Image (tube, rainbow, N blue to C red):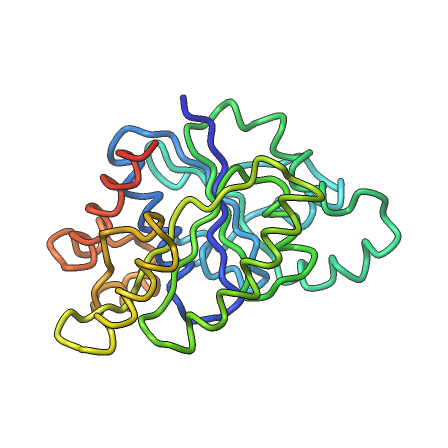
Amino acid sequence: MANKIISMINQKGGVGKTTTTCSLAAALSLKGKKVLLIDLDPQANLSQSLGISDFENNIYQALKGESEISPIKVMNNLYIVPSSMDLNALEHEMTNEPGREYLLKELLASIKDNYDFIIIDCSPSIGLIALNALSACDTFIIPVLPHHLSIQGLSGLAGVAKKVKSRINPKLKLEGVLITQFSYRKVLHRDVQNALKKHFNGRLYDSTIRENISLAEAPSTGMDIFRYAPNSNGAEDYLKLCEEFLSKQ
């Protein structure tokens, strides 16, 4: 088993973090890998995207020490620890807690050997929750839109990751950068792709995720893209990403 923990992170919203977390995890599970998802976004979009809405234990209770961490089986090889709106209060509630940036790392220590991959879906902000994700993970993936403004926002995230690496988690590495909502026909998109290639020097995935209506529709059905529209461009693109991701492990 790879036993690798990966954070899906970008402080900008709407870049495809949850879609990528859900779709990459589903693709990995179809390849026979055992995957655990951690929904660390108070909006719980990942949990809802996989049809998980009625649950007793969530990640907030586990981080607070009020319950054990209790993964829910979504389908064969795929499990999730759902989120809760209460996560919004965690930063305030944990102000005086020593080692509060290690809460998630400690939680996952007891179960990480049960999975090939643990993927953490982060909320679009860099606060205590994101710090917990970066402290707990081995690597992180940054989904990004093919716009120049998206690239400018990456420097802030890179700065945070650098500080976490030097102060909290020395093994932290960038797994890769993924362009979502990509259209090869648009000159701007190709220009941004080339700029990212230069900047990230081998860390930009060759796979890109095209604009695809099925990816937008799937969450409302509670199904991943492979169950909802297995022949769509979205399914094809995420399968390619999965194969590229596995080839680099």
Whether residue 73 is visible, yes or no, is yes
- Towards the viewer: 203 or 146: 203
Residue 97 shown left or right of residue 81 in the figure: right
- Towards the viewer: 229 or 55: 229
Q: Residue at x 59, y 47 (%)?
A: 134
- Towards the viewer: 108 or 171: 171
Quarter of the rendering occupied by the N terminus: top left
Q: How many marks?
A: 0
Whether residue 213 is visible, yes or no, is no
Instruction: Residue 156: give x, y in percent of width and height.
Output: 57, 66
The quadrant where residue 171 appears: top right
The quadrant where residue 244 appears: top left
Q: Residue at x 31, y 62 (%)?
A: 179
- Towards the viewer: 157 or 47: 157
Q: Residue at x 66, y 51 (%)?
A: 163
Residue 221 shown left or right of residue 111 in the figure: left
Instruction: Residue 35: give x, y in percent of width and height.
Output: 41, 35
Instruction: Residue 127: give x, y in percent of width and height.
Output: 67, 61
Quarter of the rendering occupied by the C terminus: top left
Q: Residue at x 67, y 58 (%)?
A: 87
Residue 136 shown left or right of residue 49 in the figure: right
Q: Is residue 30 above or below residue 38?
A: above
Residue 168 shown left or right of residue 156 in the figure: right
Q: Residue furthest right?
A: 96
Instruction: Residue 123: give x, y in percent of width and height.
Output: 55, 61
